[in-house]
Image: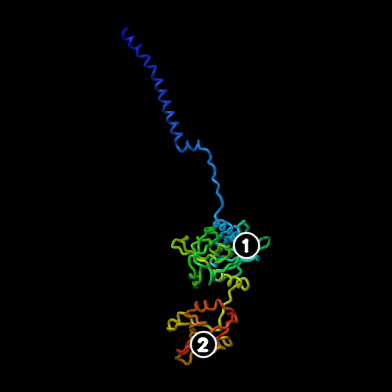
Amino acid sequence: MKFFEHKSALRPISLLWPMVIIAVLTLLALTWHWRLQESPEGIGRQAATREITPRGELADDEKTTIAIFREVSPAVVHITTLSVRQDAFTLDLQQIPKGTGSGFVWDENGHIVTNYHVIQGADAAQATFADQTVRKARLVGAYPDRDLAVLAIDARNLRLQPIPLGASRDLQVGQKVFAIGNPFGLDQSLTTGVVSALGRQIESVNRRPIKDMIQTDAAINPGNSGGPLLDSAGRLIGVNAAIYSPSGAFAGIGFAIPVDEVNRVVPQLIRHGKVTQLGFGVQFAPDQIARQLGLKGLLVLRVEPGGPAAKAGMRPTRQVDDHRVQLGDVITAIDGTPIRSMNDLRDALEQREPGQIVTVTMLRDGKEHKVKVNLVAV
């Protein structure tokens, strides 16, 4: 009887357990819900869209940059070079991509200026404009000494807009510059910077020095080659040509061919397909032979009969008997500019025109002589 009465006393306690469990579960659910609301995900679900703060006017330099890009980019093209290969099985000839670079419209007749190294060794090329118009391009002329080349496209049904021409002779370090091109194949890319230095010298693809290069910190990467370098007025002041980089990517130093040189070379390439070389009817000994003989200048080997040098009385190298050679005149200066190598001579004559008269300083038997000669195309 007592045992029965003891069990009846515990029954109300056992009925409380389900209520306790329900309460604990409810508390855990509420705690989890509160933590969810406090988490970033919960906050994100409850947050409303924020109101946009008005931008206001763009800065003047930003407006200038945007205007330059909009004005000039239609004249910048993406150049793709192609090589012709024969299929080993079908023997069919196929054109395959070889490389890419940049170029720009020179005139309304469809002439495109680029770097020589962009098209070097290619069998064909094509130019792609900003609106994705594609035209086949043919080579008009090239001048490896200055890493310049001119292509031509069919300009029919195209509204070509040449880039306004500037000058490089009056550039100053610190001027803002803008480069447009196709770095790594990414077309219509704009980079900005300043003129970092002037009068730099780099080596062309045929190992001739290119003098008076513009150095800039505007990012120039592979694919930018051949694109335009612009001043803050949107004028062409150079052609992007090379970078200095241990890694192969841009490292803050890029070089552009000055537009004054471009404006001298490109018209000749369009008219003649090449740049006219000037001389005065003389064949010189190789530089290494002159150095071996201890001469500080260019040794005259041969004088063209009836040429300007012959008329001026220049003496060639000749054999006077079976055992003795009489050295010819040694050219040491042109119009007062020292001449020590063939590169020096080319540089001294490049800026001159056929028919112009120059004063040649030369050594003969240890004595200095000066003669005037008329320059002719060679």
**Which residue sits furthest top?**
1
In this view, the residue in front, 74 or 95, is 74
Q: Residues within 10 Å of mark 1 (few under 14, many from 20)?
A: some
**Among the 4 quarters of the image, the one containing residue 227:** bottom right
Label 2's element? Answer: strand
| Residue 95 - label | none
Up-down relation of residue 9 to residue 283 (above or below):
above
**Is residue 85 among the parts visible in the rendering?**
no
**Residue under numbered circle 2:** 370
**Is residue 50 among the parts visible in the rendering?**
yes
Residue 73, horizontal then vertical, whole percent: 59, 59
Up-down relation of residue 184 to residue 299 (above or below):
above
**Among the 4 quarters of the image, the one containing residue 5:** top left
Q: Nearer the viewer, mark 1 or mark 2?
A: 2
In this view, the residue in front, 1 or 16, is 16
Residue type highlighted by circle 2: Lys
Label 1's element? Answer: strand
For the point 58% across and 74% down, the residue is 275
Up-down relation of residue 278 to residue 136 (above or below):
below
Residue 318, horizontal then vertical, whole percent: 49, 89
